[in-house]
Structure formats: C-alpha cells, structure tokens
Image (tube, rainbow, N blue to C red):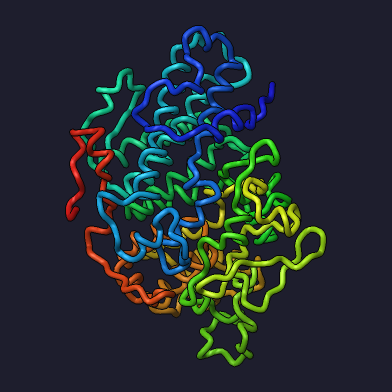
Amino acid sequence: MKKYNILVLLVMVIFCSCEDYLEKNPNYEATSEGYFISEKAAQESRVGIYTKTPSHFTDNKFMWDGMTDQLYDQYDWNEETSVSRGVLTPSSRGIVSGFFADAYKVISTANDHIANIQAMDESLFEDMTKAQYIADAQFFKAFYYFYLTEVYGGVPLYKEKVENIEDYKIAQSSKAEIVSYILQELDVAIQNLPQQLYNGYITKGSAQALKAKILLQNKRWDEAASAALEVINSGVFSLHPDYFNIFIKKGQAGNKEIMYATEFQYPEVAHSLTRLLVHSAGATPRQEFVDAYLMVDGLPVSQSTLESANYQNRDPRLYLTVRLPDDVWYDAVGQPIGFEPTQTGYYVKKFLDVDIVDNNSIHIGGTSEQGIVHLRYADVLLTYAEAKFRSGGFNQSVADLTINPIRQRVGMATVNNVNSLSDNEKWALIEYERNVELAFEGHHYFDLKRWGKQGETMTSLTDPIGYTIVWKDHFSLWPFTDSELNLNPNLVQNPGY
C-alpha cells in the first residue's frame, strides 16, 4: 500500500493567516475542479483536514484548564482567566470568539473533502476504500461539533458542503439534534476505519473513543460504558509504561496509548509549547490543584502516616505533572533552565521536553515538536469507570480493569476495597483519578460541566491576585460574539447575554 506523509500540507496550512470561517475558497487552497482525478489527490485532501487543527488544540490546548481549578493563566492572552473569573460577554475575544471560527474552518474543510471524494469514481481508489477517505472527515466533524455544542450549546449545523455564503447564514440546531447527527456519523466512520494502532491517522479505536466521550458528556451512561468497553475488549490499545513520555516526542512513536494526536516535525512544522511553559509561563498550576494530590499510599495528607513536608511521598503523578518550587531542571546541554516567575509559584512539567532544546531555544517560539494528545487509552478506561458508576455498576472488578492499572503504572497505591466503599467514596475515587491523571490535557473544564460543579468549584478558589470570582448559571454556555451575530443574522444569542 502506498504511503503519503501526513506532513505534506502542514507547512502550507498551519502558517497561513486566520480568516473568517464564512470566507469561501481562501487563496491558499486549490480549487477542486480538475484536481480530484487520482487517489493521490484524495490523500492530499485527507491530509489537509488534519492540518486545520486550530491553536486551541495544539500548543494552547493545556490552557483550556486555565478555566478550571487546575491552572491559572496569568497573562490572559486567550481570555481563559476572564472566563474562569466569570467575565463572559458578547464582546469577549480570545478563546470565546476564536474557537467558534476555527472549529468551523475544520468542519468546512471536512465537508468540502467529503463532497469531492463522493464525486470521484470508485475505480480511482486502490490503496484505501472511498469510504475510508470519507471516514476521517466524519470523525473531525464529530470532534469539533462535540466541542462546539459543549461550549455554545446549539450551533449552526452544516451537514454538507455549502456552496455560497448566504447558505452559511442559518439558525442554530439544537444540541440534541447535533449530538444525534455526529453519533450517526461516527457509527458510519467506525464501520469503515481500520482496526489498528494509531499511526498518525484516525482508526476505528479513535472513533470509538470519541463516541464514548460524547456519550459520557451527554450523560448516556449505559451507551458510554458499552462504547468504551468495545475499545477495551478490542485489545488494540494499552497503557504506556512511562506516563511522562506519552507527552514528549521520544515516547510517542508507536505508543499504544495514544489514540489521536496532532503531530509535528521540527523544523518543518513545529509549535511553541515549550516557550509557553517556561519563558512565558502562561498558565501555571493553582495551589488548590497541587494540594489535591493524595499521598502515595492513597490517603489524604491528613490521614497518612507518611512524611508529607515539602510534598514528600505524594502521588507520583504530582512530580511528573507539576514543577515544584525546589525542582531544578537541566536543558539538553546540561545547563539549569531559567523559568520566568509565576504568580502561583508552580509550573507545568507535563509536556516539557528538555531533551530537544537548550536554554536559549526554550525562549524562542516554534521549537517544539511533540504531538498534542487529544484521545488516549487512560481516558477510555476512566470513561468506562465513570459510566459504570453512574449506572450503578462500579465495583472491584471495574476498578481492577480501569483505575488500578492506571495507578500501578506510576507506583500509586491501588484500591482493593471498592465493594465496601460508599457511593460518595466511590465517586471521590473516580473524580480524583480524572483530575490528576488527565491534568492539563483539556478535559477538566468539560468534566466540571458534566458534574454540575463549575460554579461551586470556581467560586471556591482564591485568585492569585485577589480578583473576586463570580459565577452565573448561564456561564455554562458561552455567548456568541457580536461579530458572529453580525455575520449571521439568523443566529440567536444564548440566554443571559
């Protein structure tokens, strides 16, 4: 089977300037007329969808957790701190306006791809089936519509390629209608994607993991458990033995835990995550998050008999996730890394790949190349655990399948008395695991929303510079910005704004 490099179009697209998602045929894209006459064109079009990943899902993805009790964004470049403080208005910019436009760029590209592939003759396809070329696009539509519905609720639903700008100006569909649609799209994609490890392209397991995530977020517990169990029972994916290396370049090739990641290759295509973590120190761990880590024996600090001063004997994931005040890190040439001061005193250690940079290049953007992981097997295990709890089936055997292997990987004490725990204790166990295992990966904002704990959590925090955090119920959905309402007069503003 012929192989085409997934990086073929990355340089062309990632470094292009942002334009409004309503603009048709931007000048860096080839027109389809006379182009889709070979499978090579279909493959290049397929790669083009992957290259559209917005910065909110690349080097800025960890900042989603700057809207939670995990991280504090001291510069508020993307307005995550504004969101965390309850400053949400139709004039908001940053992630509130940018994600809407960027998500629709991917959806539009996916719809165009599907239309072009469908118009091609079956005889042109040899390396892959026509349906598989379409399946990637179906996955990406589901992925971005899922996130759109979570932050905005109902949004305009474009099921097919839009031919003119006026056809973009439609009212939003309900969230329920969109969720139903994307689950149908995923079911079709699952039938046509290969059952194999993730190798830079979406697989059957990738689509099944996304399906389980969507079902969980929409509180369809039994269906979520079934979808997650399909991934588990496939035997294709497994936990990577080295937790830290999941998130840096040297540990990602052939990694059996990664199910979907945006990939990079320095110097042709790179990002600036290392600079954001060290030089800019954009989003840094909150004290409340650091304090949440249990002792290595699985007990709270107040109950454990182990020495706890200076964060000794904590859950080992703390030391793999957070750079503590006394940590000294050395760069690739053995020099201590100089960290920019932060208002919390902590830094994100997860994702910090010191093997490929020296102390000078750390301060330069565009030098990082690790893949940004979006779906991984540990999340599937925790999805299954939570779904089983919600449906009344979380017991010792489920814990042994899900939570305990995750803990064993890092040397954390396992839980062997699940059947004797109260429901509150079982839930605390699951909530804790999602909080620390998936920290800074962009999941926690949606976890808090699903658990109905956004307001309670955010108003309990101490702002590092003394800002008063407020919460109103309508903040659970973001506003459509004034610019989007002007572009699409049929779009109806969310309640409360």
Q: Residue 350 at what x, y percent from top left? A: 61, 62
| Residue appearing at x 66%, y 72% in the figure | 411
| Residue appearing at x 54%, y 70% in the figure | 342
Residue situated furthest bottom in the rendering: 305
Determine whether 267 is above or below 243 in the image.
above
67 lies left or right of 493: right
| Residue appearing at x 33%, y 18% in the figure | 163
Determine whether 195 is above or below 89 in the image.
above
Q: Residue 209 at what x, y percent from top left? A: 49, 46
Q: Residue 200 at what x, y percent from top left? A: 62, 37
Q: Nearer the viewer, residue 200 or 474?
A: 474
347 lies left or right of 102: right
Is residue 187 something that shows in the picture? Answer: no
Q: Nearer the viewer, residue 245 or 353?
A: 353
Q: Nearer the viewer, residue 303 or 361?
A: 361
Determine whether 206 is above or below 304 in the image.
above
| Residue appearing at x 66%, y 25% in the figure | 4
Q: Residue 440 at what x, y percent from top left? A: 52, 60
Residue situated furthest right in the rendering: 333
* Quadrant position of the N terminus in the picture: top right
Give the quadrant of residue 64.
bottom left
218 lies left or right of 249: left
